[in-house]
Structures are given as C-alpha cells and as structure tokens.
Image: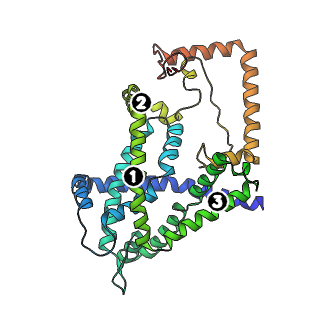
Amino acid sequence: MNDFITLIENILNQLIGSLEWVMLIAVLGGGIYLCLISKFYPLTKIKSAFILLLSKNENQGISRFQALSAVLAATVGLGNISGVAIAIHMGGPGVLVWMWITAIIGMIIKFYSCSLSVQIRKLNSDGTFLGGPMYYMSLGIKNWGKLLAIWFSIAGLFGVLPAFTANQLTQTYINVINPNDFIFLGDFQWKLITGILLALISSFVIFGGLKKIVKVTSSLVPLMVGLYFFMGLFILFFNYELVLPTFKLIFKEAFNLETILAGGSTDVGDVSFLVPVVRLGVTTAPKGTPWHSWAVVASGGMSIGHKGMVFASKALGMTMIDLFTNSRLRGEIKSEFKLRKGNYIYEPMLPPGPPPIGEE
C-alpha cells in the first residue's frame, strides 16, 4: 500500500512540477497581455467599481455586495497569513513586491473573466443564469472549449478542496483546547467528532442554496475583513519605528540578484553577516510541499525524511572533519568571506540587548 501511495505521489509531483511553469507563463503572460491591450482599463475603473458596489441593485438574484462577500469568504483565510509567511521564508522579504505585482495582474485577469461570465452564460427555464469560466469556455470556444471547461472544473475541484483548512482548524482545536484533558477519547476520535460537527454546520449553509450562502457570508465577511484590517493596523502602530526600514528592506531585496538565485531568508540570517556559513540542501519531503506545514512534519517521520537527514548528517560531519584538519581550507574561507563582505557593516533590525520589560 505504501509503495502504491508513493507511486501516486511521484506522478503528481512530476505533473505539478511541469504545470507550475505553464501556470506561471500563462498567468503572467496573459495578465500582461490584457494589461497592455486594454491600456490598464480595469485599474482606471476602481472608483466606479466602489460606487456600483455601494449602490442599490434592482436586478434579480443576489446583490453586488453579496457576490463580493461570497468571493471574499473563499479567498481571505489561512493562505493570506500562512501562505505569505511561507513565501517570505522561502523567497525573502523582497518576494512581497512580486506578490503585489502579481496581485495587480491577477485583478485584471479577474476583471475580464467576470465580464465574460456575465456576457456568455446559460439561461435556465426558471429564468436564472448559470455562468463562470466553465460556461464561457464551453459556449464561447468552438473546438477546445468543452475540454478546457472540464479541465478547469477538475483543477478547480482540487483548488477549493477544503481538506487542508478543515485539517488545520481541527488540529488547532486539539492543540489549544486539548479535549482529552476533559474526556479522554484519543486524538483521532476527537478529530473525527470535530470534522463531523464542521460538516453538519457547513451543510446548513451549503444545502440552503446560493442565497443562503451569500446571506451568511455577507454577514460574516465584513467582520472577518475588519478584524484582519484592524489587527494589521494594531501591529503597524505598535511597531511604527520598523515600518520604513521594513519597506526599504522589501524593495531592496526584491531586486537583489543573489537572493533571486540563492533563495531567501534562513534561520542564520544575522550570523551569516558576521562569520562564514555554509548551506546544505537535502530532500526531506516530496517536491512542492510547502515548508512550515503539517505535510513537512509528517514527512519527517517517513523514510524520505529519515534518509535525507542521515545524508545531511554524514555531509555535515565530513565537512567538519575537513575544516578541523585542513588549515589551508579555513584560510581560503575566511579570505573569501572578507572579499564578499567588503566594507559593508551589518546592522540588525532588532535593537541590541534584551527586550524591554514593561513598567508596573
């Protein structure tokens, strides 16, 4: 069974590795093309969009605000926090600039996707409409439209699969509340109970249809977005002295060639400016697994994690032996470090000394 699962994982990893470049070229290339051919038309209509959003909608169906709430409910969440943190860890602070640029391009793509969804859609016998990319593909593209619509639907099924979010919520509940301290049933039993409760609560909303979904999301989304917004303001206000240096670092690292080629931040970032360091990369998890996630933790207890760490231990051990026994090698390392550092004096963003203790 384990061999079969490993085979499936390898096949999926190979497919994902190839599709990542296709998606990057298609999304960025298509977005830039739409930006240029439209002369950034969607960005010039942001003010009009807010006016329409807040105006009264006399058409049938859901309101504009309810439609926006339904979209935000599926967009704002775990990925906006942990996803950005993982991106910064892997690519450094400069990755934020490219995320902002990609977001602007994505907004323009979304504008035309929504426009096509309204213009090319299916009318039901009861007067309601069915729309979306799968419909304007199948109705608007003669030869390959149906195939593209099926592919989009399959990809969308995996893209919105709530298994990751449900697992994180359940695991957080187990770690924080620790219900076994009150009634000992075991972690698996409590996860099962929590999962069933989540499914039951969600079913009351989902089975109520689109109007029930947008009614709930339009009530919860303003609270959720407001909470995110004011938490961000709170963090910025109490760390105001770091705002300008942080923005300076973000834009500096965004165009740092060494960061682009070698990767981003590490756990020895400050140390690497003071003494020579060496970095070793080994495979301890399947390709494409996001770091600082439960999947990486699980991989540590599998054969792939064990083999990777054994190889890393051997490489580090032999490297230390070479450094201790070869004085010429140590001298070359010190000389290279001084040459690369030059006259640059590193100043850490954190103030010197222990953190301040609040006065009573």
Q: Which mark is residue 257?
A: none
The residue beneath circle 3 is 194
Of discs 1 and 2, which sits in the foreground? 2
Which residue matches tag 2? Answer: 238
* Quadrant in the rendering for residue 245: top left
Residue 28's mark? 1
Residue 339 in the image: above or below residue 128 = above
The part of the image, by quadrant, that contains residue 306 is: top right
For this view, does 192 lie left or right of residue 310? Answer: left
Residue at 74%, 54% in the rendered image: 183
Query: 89 or 67: which is nearer to us?
Result: 67
Q: Give left or right: position of 290 versus 119.
A: right
Depth check, mark 3 against mark 1: the one in front is: 3
Instruction: Point out the tag, 2 or 3, that comes first from the N-terminus.
Output: 3
Which amino acid, by three-letter code, is at mark 3?
Thr
Secondary element under disc 2, as helix, strand or loop, is: helix
Where does residue 87 sit, x and y in percent of width and height? 50, 42
Is residue 251 shown above or below 41? Answer: above
Residue 292 in sight from this viewpoint: yes
Amino acid, disc 1: Leu
Circle 1 SS class: helix
Residue at 44 percent of width and 76 percent of height: 146
User: Mark 1 and mark 2: span between their CA atoms?
Assistant: 36 Å
Q: Give the image location of residue 42, x and y in percent.
A: 26, 56
Q: Residue at x 38, y 30 (%)?
A: 243
- On the rendered structure, is 165 left or right of 233? right
* Residue in the foreground of this view, choosing between 117 and 51: 51
Mark 2, residues whose alpha carbon is within 10 Å: few (<14), some, or many (≥20)? few
For marks 3 and 1, the one nearer the N-term is: 1
Position in image of residue 171 (x %, y %): 64, 51
Viewer-proximal residue among 182 and 282: 182
